[in-house]
Image: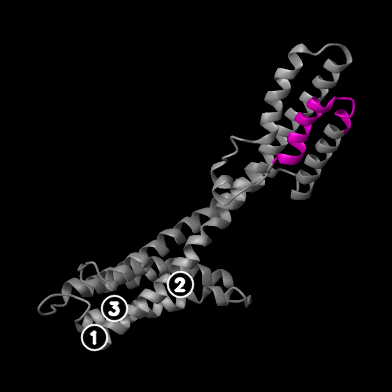
Amino acid sequence: MATLLCVTLTAAYFLIDVRPRHSGGTWMGYSLGALGAALIVWLALLGVRKRAVTAGHYSLKAWVSAHVYLGLSLTVIATLHTGFQFGMNVHTLAYVLMMLVIVSGLFGVWAYASLPNLLSANRGETTRRQMLDALATLDGQLHEAAQPLDRDMAAIVRLSLEKTDIAGGYWQRVFGLYGGCANDRAIERLARARQGARGPEAETLAQIDALLRKKAEALAFARRQVRITALLEGWTFVHVPMTFALLAALTAHIVSVFFYW
């Protein structure tokens, strides 16, 4: 339906002679604008529809499918509506916001088609609770292993126990910006401290080093999960606010056309 709509409207645009030229102010421009505005409002109602899940022909799955394809058709409908005339005004702003919403929506389509598989492949049979429990177990073992150490050595272990951050801010999660990871710093400090250790202390530090490295592996595993989840959810932080901005710009566009032109 979306393809047929785009082909029909494109053919009509180039076959119908409009004087003096195609623009948003002609009868065809108004028709395309009304259709585009109605589609934008209907597409924005997906958020309402998602809260009323039903089965059948107009199930949520069918609604989302229509949302994607009819949303893509807006690139043709809105562009034809403009008559390929753009400028520094609210009308072009509405068009640009619409395109940003569509691009972010395309990223969302890719995210939901690809990232759940990556999430499942990375996690394997391990649940989120099991990941956290594994880290808690390692922290408990580190705490016990550090009991015989003096204050300076114990401070290295406390650095990992008290300062390690699994997630962090959104961009930190997406780009894996954990260069200052407390657990990594603890491993580096422990490596220097082990150089002069002897006897039982050396054995204890070797045990702690092994635990810290196991914790580093567990953290990398958990942070990959966090990164994929952030990518899966983060596109909505652009798509939804941009949609509201588009509705505001669209309202300004319509009001300015009917009251000031």
Which amino acid lies under the numbered mark 3 shown in the image of this protein?
A: Leu
Is residue 3 in view from this perspective? no
Which callout, 1 or 3, points at the residue further toward the start of the chain? 3
Hey, which quadrant is residue 195 in on the image?
top right
User: In which quadrant will I find the N terminus?
Assistant: bottom left
Work out which quarter of the rendered image holds the C terminus and state it: bottom left
Q: Residues within 10 Å of mark 2 (few under 14, many from 20)?
A: some
Q: Residue at x 83, y 11 (%)?
A: 198
Residue assigned mark 3: 32
Residue to which mark 2 is pinned: 244
Q: Nearer the viewer, mark 1 or mark 3?
A: 1
What distance separates the C-alpha of mark 1 from that of mark 2?
Answer: 23 Å
In the rendered view, would you say 168 is above or below 256?
Answer: above
Report the amino acid beneath label 2.
Phe
Q: Position of residue 8 (x, y in %)?
A: 28, 73
Earlier sequence position, callout 1 versus callout 2: 2
Q: Which residue is at 46% across, 61% downward?
A: 105
Look at the magenta stretch and give its main secondary structure.
helix
Placement of 137 over or under 211, stated as above or below: below
Q: Disc 2 or 3, which lies upstream in sequence?
A: 3
Give the crowd class for mark 3: few <14, some 14-19, many >=20 residues within 10 Å. Answer: many
Q: Secondary structure at mark 2?
A: helix
C-alpha span from label 1 to label 3: 20 Å
Residue that label 1 marks: 260
Q: Position of residue 253 (x, y in %)?
A: 31, 78
Pointers 1 and 3 in contact (CB under 8 A)?
no
Label 1 element class: helix
Q: Which residues are magenta?
A: 144-164
**Disc 3 on helix, strand or loop?**
helix
Q: Of residues 187 and 44, which is closer to you in this image?
A: 187
